Image (tube, grey):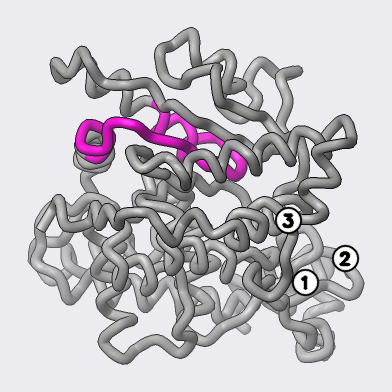
Amino acid sequence: MTTDTLNKVQDTSKVNDTRKAELLSSPVEHIDITDFDARPIVEAMGKMSFTSRDLANAAKIYNTMLEDKDCSIILVIAGSTSAGGCMDLYTQLVKSNMVDAIVATGATIVDMDFFEALGHKHYQAKEIPDDDTLRSLYIDRIYDTYIDEEQLQDCDHTIGRIADSLEPRAYSSREFIKEMGKWLADGNAKKPNSLVQTAYEHDVPIFCPAFVDSSAGFGLVKHQVDAMKRGGRYMVLDAIADFRELTDIKIKAGTTGLLMIGGGVPKNFTQDTVVCAEILGHDDVEVHKYAIQITVADVRDGACSSSTLQEAASWGKVSTAMEQMVFAEATSVLPLLASDAYHRGAWKNRAKRAFAKLFD
């Protein structure tokens, strides 16, 4: 361990703690929505009240999206549900043609999904020692979930190497994540079921509008610094291209539905495509016809993780006819919603959009 690391630990007497292997001994197991049928419980919850009825209504809206032959579905992910056990759930939605495009945080795509594709894992915390002790052991914590920081640095450096291999020019996050998927599919994946690789193989584009705010950022900074030291050129990320490309998808899709886990930048970025299309002269562009948001944020701070869906209607982004806010921690309700939709099977009759091919 370097002196730098020691300086970040408040109580250096804990540096020699030998408990790392013990603390990283219980991997998170990702839920399989094909392994259980949630239809009966979702139907029963629809006869209840409070969050139960909200969830049942959200499930009904999602099934309606899947049944609507004209509706393209955008999955929006913020927060740490992938680390918490929903990673394979998202992959199954792509495999089953239940989503057509993805907008997510960089942490979701890189720190969690790509990280596990490299063969690393997230771990359940059986106990939570002092966080300075965790720092001395190079263990990062997400609530009650652990990550080995040394493995996360492997992820950083891998992103840097992928960037080094590319032509030095501007890339949208979609383009770069496509290259990550291609790299995994070319025999480098140690876990075959990642969202990044599966989306690449099914022509489902992934956008990360704040991509550098993740493990990817460290690798990309190293890529640029190394290139500058060599006196050479380097790749850059084009955030404007992200917005333009996702707006292109909205224009092409016409009718759209949003399945949003969390909120923040991915949520607002996706909703704003309606306004952007109008700015580009597409006065006939539809607002997002369907919208579901699962969140623990509320309106007390004036935000609700980028406005309630009703508020978004005032901006001309979302219809209020088929929308549902579900105020719940997503890992507790999303598996029910996704399993219900999977077993109802409307996805079997959906046309594949393959929106990634728009940019070939």
Question: Residue 224 appears at what percent x and percent y?
Answer: 23, 62
Q: Is 61 covered by the magenta stretch? A: no
Q: For the residues labelled 1 and 3, say whether their Cβ atoms are less than 8 Å apart.
A: no
Question: Residue 21 appears at what percent x and percent y?
Answer: 77, 91
Q: In which quarter of the image is residue 230?
A: bottom left
Q: Name the residue: 68% across, 71% down.
A: 31
Choose mark 1 or mark 3, whichever is in front: 3
Q: The N terminus appears in which quarter of the rendering?
A: bottom right
Question: Residue 2 appears at what percent x and percent y?
Answer: 59, 80
Choose mark 2 or mark 3, whichever is in front: 3
Seen in the image, is 300 located left or right of residue 167?
A: right
Question: Which residue in the structure is indicated by mark 3?
Answer: 39
Q: Is 262 covered by the magenta stretch? A: yes
Callout 3, which amino acid? Arg
Q: Earlier in the sequence, mark 1 or mark 3?
A: 3
Element under disc 3? helix
Q: For the residues labelled 2 and 1, say whether their Cβ atoms are less than 8 Å apart.
A: yes
Q: Can residue 80 be seen in this view?
A: no
Q: Which of marks 2 and 3 is nearer the N terminus?
A: 3
Callout 1, which amino acid? Leu
Question: Which residue in the structure is indicated by mark 2?
Answer: 130
Element under disc 2? loop
In the displayed orientation, state which residue is furthest to the top.
Answer: 314
Seen in the image, is 104 located left or right of residue 330?
A: left
Question: Which residue in the structure is indicated by mark 1?
Answer: 134
Which residues, given as a range, are shown in magenta?
249-271
Callout 2, which amino acid? Asp
Question: Residue 325 appears at what percent x and percent y?
Answer: 67, 30
Q: Which of 111 and 199 is in front in this view?
A: 199
